[in-house]
Amino acid sequence: MRKNIAIIILMVGLIISMYFNYQFKAYKDNQKVDYTVKLNHGTQIGIKESIQNLDYVIKGLEDNSSKETVIYTLGNLAVSLKVGEESFVFLNSDFREDQLSSTNLIYNVFRDMYTYIRVEIIGEILSNKISLEKESRNQLIKDIGVLKQDLEYIDSQFNEDILKEQSPKWIENKWKALIGEIVNRNSDFKLYERIKMKYNL
């Protein structure tokens, strides 16, 4: 009798253990999917869509589009950069679970780019501190062209196909190296001057 009770208890314990292991596996698998989705969201919109939006801004400036059209395209660019920032803010907790890594530099650089577009370009166009005469347009094309070129370079080194097999620590270090490289390559670009000083790159 006691032997039968012991076997029943053992079987019940085994079933409970299997159930919780299954639930935990499903949770971990779901966490992995969420991590990949957030990572892809950050790179697809934060980087790739921002590059596309930079193209639209440059084309509008080159085609002598109206102030309203230029501001509209800049607004779309600001949104995609903001999505990139928020995606990596959400990823920070995932990174911290692995080797105490952080997305801090990644989302802050997106935030700096967003602020540059939103405040220093859109804000100054709206307040007429930046005119859209030929000389100002050419300078904007040049400045925005630097940002586009560098985001394309980051995309070639930092896209989702490269990142999906890498650890958070590798991603953190790779981003720091890439940002250091682009700010030192264009040290006279005022956005990069601030980024370099702010993050000691």
Image (cartoon, rainbow, N blue to C red):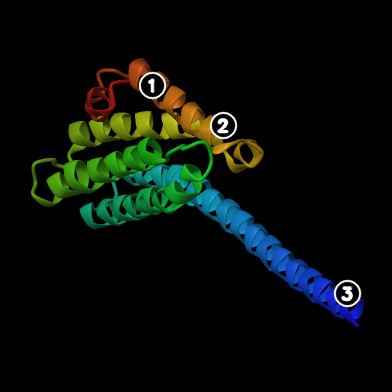
Q: Nearer the viewer, residue 33 or 130?
A: 33
Q: Residue 178: x and y, percent? A: 45, 25
The N terminus: image quadrant: bottom right
Spatial separation of the CA atoms under disc 1 and disc 3: 63 Å
Mark 3 or mark 2: which comes first in sequence?
Answer: 3
The residue type indicated by label 2 comes to Ser
Instruction: Mark 3 and mark 2 in contact? Answer it, CB < 8 Å.
Output: no
Residue 195 location (% of width, % of height): 27, 28
The kind of residue tagged 3 is Ile
On screen, residue 64 versus residue 124, left or right, reads right
> Which quarter of the image is occupied by the C terminus?
top left
Q: Which mark is residue 113?
A: none
Is 165 situated left or right of 181 in this image?
A: right
Specify the farthest residue to the front.
2
- Crowding around mark 2 (Cα neighbors within 10 Å: few <14, some 14 to 19, many 20+) is few
The answer to whether one can see residue 198 in this image is: yes
The tag on residue 7 is 3
Residue 194 image-quadrant placement: top left
- Residue 48 appears in the figure: no
Residue drawn at x 57%, y 58% as measured from the top left: 34
Find residue 159 and report its horizontal and vertical position in percent: 57, 39
Tell me the residue that label 2 is attached to. Answer: 156
According to the image, label 1 marks what residue?
180
Q: Nearer the viewer, residue 77 or 109?
A: 109
Location of residue 201 with respect to 110 vertically, above or below: above
Q: First in sequence: mark 1 or mark 2? A: 2
- The amino acid pointed to by label 1 is Gly
Distance of label 1 from label 2 (alpha carbons): 16 Å
Q: Nearer the viewer, residue 135 or 34?
A: 34
Relative to 139, 47 lies left or right: right
Local packing at callout 3 (Cα closer than 10 Å; few below 14, some 14-19, many 20+) is few
